[in-house]
Image (spheres, coloured by chain):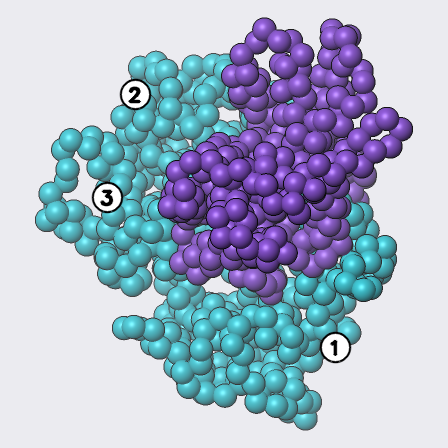
Amino acid sequence: MTAVPGTVANGRSRVLRPQQKYLPIFATLALLVLMYSAGVLRYDGFSDTQVVLNVFVDNAFLLVVAVGMTFVILTGGIDLSVGSVVALTTMLSASLLEERGWSPYLVLPLVLLLGALLGFGMGCIIHYFEIQPFIVTLAGMFLARGLCYTISTSSITISDPFWTSIAQQRFRFGGFFISASVVVALVVVAIGIYVLGYTRLGRNTYAIGGNPQSALLMGLPVARTRIAVYTISGFCSALGGVLLSFYMLSGNSGHGLGLELDAIAAVVIGGTLLTGGSGYLVGTVLGVLVLGLIQTIITFQGDLSSWWTKIVIGVLLFVFIVLQRAVTRRQR
Amino acid sequence: METSGEARAILTMTGIGKRFPGVRALDEVDFRLFPGEVHALMGENGAGKSTLIKVLTGVYDVDEGDIVLDGAPVRFTGPLQAQQAGVSTVYQEVNLCANLSVAENIHIGREPRRFGAIQWGELRRRSRHLLDGLGLDVDVSAPLGSLSLAVQQMVAIARAIDISAKVLILDEPTSSLDAGEVGQLFRVMRQLKGEGMAILFVSHFLDQVYEISDRMTVLRNGRRVGEYATRELSQLDLVSAMIGKELAALEELEEQPRRSLAALERDRPVVEAAGLGRNGAVAPFSLTIHRGEVVGLAGLLGSGRTEVARLLFGADRADAGALKVDGEPVNMRGPRTAMARDIAFCSENRRTEGLVAELTVRENIILALQAARGWSRPLPRRRQDELVDRYVKALRIVPANPEALVGQLSGGNQQKVLLARWLITEPRLLILDEPTRGIDVGAKAEIQRLVVTLSDGGMAVLFISAELEEVLRLSHKIAVLRDRRMVDELANDDEVTAERIMAIIASGNGTAPPEAPPGPHGPDVVVLGEEA
């Protein structure tokens, strides 16, 4: 009799858990399938596989940034600086390559390191001074955006041969192609999935998001983990910036305006809880695809303003946040 | 000490002293723990139990004294070091991550890995093995949050054992468990004891302490009163040792004749609920509370006691029935309506629903009165000090410093602060939801005496407690709840006993309404059915 409470709960969860754990992801997947089917039915040429691949090509940088954002949000934090760090990276790369004539083999690691350092710095401030991530990364956002304009107020075109060759690199298969950026993004996603699912750093990330106090009492390295996720996010932002500079072949202080919000939206639509502790990178990938597909559909429609993208994203966000709430309520 | 002088203590603390600004929290305290025993650490709130545990586990630095673990002097710098040396602590609030699986909660930080990758299969296998050893059948990949609190606590213990604990500290582990769950925990404790583990157990429930412990150390005001073998110390002696004075307070209450219900019923009712109910919370019930009357609500955890209180206070809105205050029908739109009618509600979750830990004692006490006056008419500081001072003295809040932060007070004193907050509003109906849970005997007696004094002064009190003795001692009238339904209401005369109420709770068989037929369930089943 005494063991019954455990077994009762146990029997119940065995039936419900698999669906419930992945429910938000299935919801996003269903939405994606629905949008795609609607597109195929409505527009000629939408069924071309290249249309889907182009969603990846156009959003590779967002995907990378969103991976970093997923880490941060899983700990219950937020990183508002990503868009500005992306812009700073494009600007710095362009300026160093074009105006200073530095070698791309030096510029590339340098800007990545700088992004990681920025994230590391913000992580340290957040953890050691116990300041809300919102405020710290907001400050980081202004700082990075401001730094862009000290480099140059106008756009700098990149003509460096290394940069342009990667930008034009196409991996072709059966008449379709993806860009080098897509490969980079997918590798980043794969590494992210591995880290979150199979390493202590990843599991500690979930633990901190679940209950930071408990994580500390369980003897987990909370400080190290929290700083690490912001460093990862900073690194991913810088890498996203590099990918964007491949895509645009320019550095511009206005790049990535509002990108942080797109990244957060993608993560949330992908089923990660803003309160932390629950979510999967696969969901984030789906979230980015949803955002990309909305854009594609609006392009195909032709007569809609691109601002409709924002409107649809806004509505979707509402729906998904309410959905998450409903799911977590039911779990209680 | 005479029985096991030859056995070697696994843990010895000698002459431990710990000072906080203005307070001497521990003074020359000795403590020993032997393998294969359950040792209860007893004392009132603020006696130094928590401080001693925190000093032992390295949360606080030791100012004076020595700690010897397994023959070697130790001085831990934090819970992590203590844990690695074999001293693990399981707290009242389960300090695990509800979002992670059972297996992960047991092993996080020490996962089996190959080339840096966590071996999930191995992790689950080990966890299953460990829990099997504790006689617990749980799906190890279920998220911890989906399991009952007792099972969560067992998982916390499993984690502690797995870190090769020699000493297991259980700090108030039973506070939130029901009887069946406590039994389950004790079974595991006995098993671990049999395996030679030393267990330090802290609990406010004397019955539990007597059931499980072999030896106890009593603290009072930061000093050790003595170490006793449990079977050689009577409950009365224990309580006297803890509070350092004779049990006059409690006995006095026992002696007091219960006032006749009939006399009270002639007075006007303060609150009349007729068919009041809320779907999913509690079935429609009728209840009348008169001036100067104490109405006790009895029932198991989750039987709807709190829900009744919340409806009367307007914290939840009723979807059926009517409520009259002072004979006038009232539409309870929310707590503000209730407060305007002089109804006060002392919630059972004092941490989450009552006190603001970051404010001082004075600010917390003033809160409700100020809210009732409206923010445009601030209470003069001098009047504040006067009021607060009076209640700090009357309720014996320790430290008697109105400017101390509430978060730093012990549980019993926090409860008193919450009580004081409502008392200064001079309510006509005071709803007390589990006011004595998790607080020590001395404070309990004080709160009970206070209830009697208040009702003598004409205040109506709705008293909710899981402890039947307490309900019986204080109430004029007892309403019994079962499965979210009020099944009986009885005048508390000499014929009413704890057994009779328990029988009603178990069978639902009082003067029960026909729609609640006595179920075929035994008491065990009822306990399970009550699980929230």
Q: Which residue is mark 1?
A: B196
Work out how far the residue at label 3 is from the one at label 1, CA to CA, in angstroms.
51 Å
Chain that the image shows in cyan: B
Residue drawn at the location 50% of the way across and 35% of the way down: A255
Q: Identify the subunit bearing mark 1.
A: B
Labels 3 and 1 within one chain: yes
**Label 3 sits on residue:** B366
Check disc 1 and give the amino acid type: Gly
Q: What's the residue type where badge 3 is placed?
A: Ile
Q: Chain of mark 2?
A: B
The C terminus of chain B lies in quadrant: top right
CA separation in Å, label 2 and label 1: 62 Å
Quarter of the rendering containing residue A265: top right
| Amino acid marked by disc 2 | Asp
Does the image show residue B529? no
Residue matched to label 2? B326
